[in-house]
Amino acid sequence: MLKAAAVAQTEEEEAPKEEVKNVPQYGSVAWIYYLSETEGHLPTPINVSIAASLYYPCPELKWYNFDVYPHKIKLTNTGYTVILGAKWRTERPYLEGGPFLEKHVLSQVHFHWGKNMMEGSEHTVDKRRYPGEMQVTFFKADYMTQDEALRHNDGVVMVCYMIKYGVNPDERLSWIIEGFPRIQEAQTHTRVGPYPMSRLLPMFYEDYFLYWGGLDTVRGENYVVRWLVPRKSLFASFDQMKAFRKLWNPWDEPNLCNFRQVKDRQDRQILFISPHWNLYNSLLPTPRIPEESISVLSSNYQKNHWMLPPQNAYMLPKEEATED
């Protein structure tokens, strides 16, 4: 009997112990990161709404250097979408605060659209689909590149703006669409602008939805991505959305639509971060006049004014601006 007890004790000692994971405190930013472990590979896109979300507090989201003019902006028709990529001579725009524990830098912007004004957005809001969607990719600065960031659960964030229908053209999109005739064929590119990203992106510090989900690639890979859907949106006229459908796919035919179908939410959390404005509709009304930029200069630009491009001379202290 003693021998059997000794054998049982030996087996218990040899059996691998289950690792006990510490769950971060609810209400913290760390808890948002923790959700990636169970929800990071669930399919996307999904429907978001106030009614189906969990109110969650976060610090203010901060936007740095979005008023700084880039050195150049390249617009590319990949045959599947339009990608806007920009290069800065020094420091790129980035996000901090909000649901982030680290600095996330701007990578690229791309678009989704449909064959008519009744479809086009990948996400639906209150089960309503919009004519288009602009997705802006950010990645964790510590990973240096987007490709490396995709290999990590906390690496990539996608900010997804709905594009509503508007009677008049949206000036934020006009300077991009102006380059479309030069990239009608697939795998062609052109230069546009350059203009600061604040001229394109509606910035926000609260009032947005957040969830985790997978990003599938044509090679069959699935990456974990954090998705942010702000209540602020863009708008586009009929002619502006028609310009997207004139672009060609790889088979030299009009690329009429490139959006994915909405997937089931399953059992994931959709967080409604720091709601502030009216809660009658999940998307906010389009402002009648352009909103002022909330972007601020990073400490690097503030300490080293030589880093600013000539177009941003108005940001220099009066003494330096006079000397120039």
Image: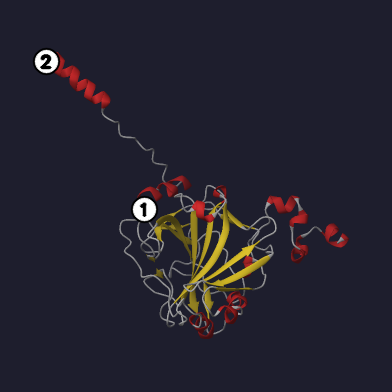
State whether residue 170 appears in this view: no
Residue 318 shown left or right of residue 234 in the figure: right
Give the SS element for disc 2: loop
- Residue 42, given in percent of the width and then of the height, sits at 35, 57
Q: Earlier in the sequence, mark 1 or mark 2?
A: 2
Q: Which mark is residue 39?
A: 1
* C-alpha gap between disc 1 and disc 2: 48 Å
State whether residue 18 appears in this view: yes
- Residue 187, given in percent of the width and then of the height, sits at 53, 73
241 over 135 or under it: above or below: below
Residue farthest left in this picture: 1
Residue at x-position 64% and y-position 60%? 295
Residue linked to disc 2: 1
Quarter of the rendering containing residue 280: bottom left
Residue 194 shown left or right of residue 97 in the figure: right
Q: How is colour applied across the structure in the image?
A: secondary structure
Circle 2 residues within 10 Å: few <14, some 14–19, many ≥20: few
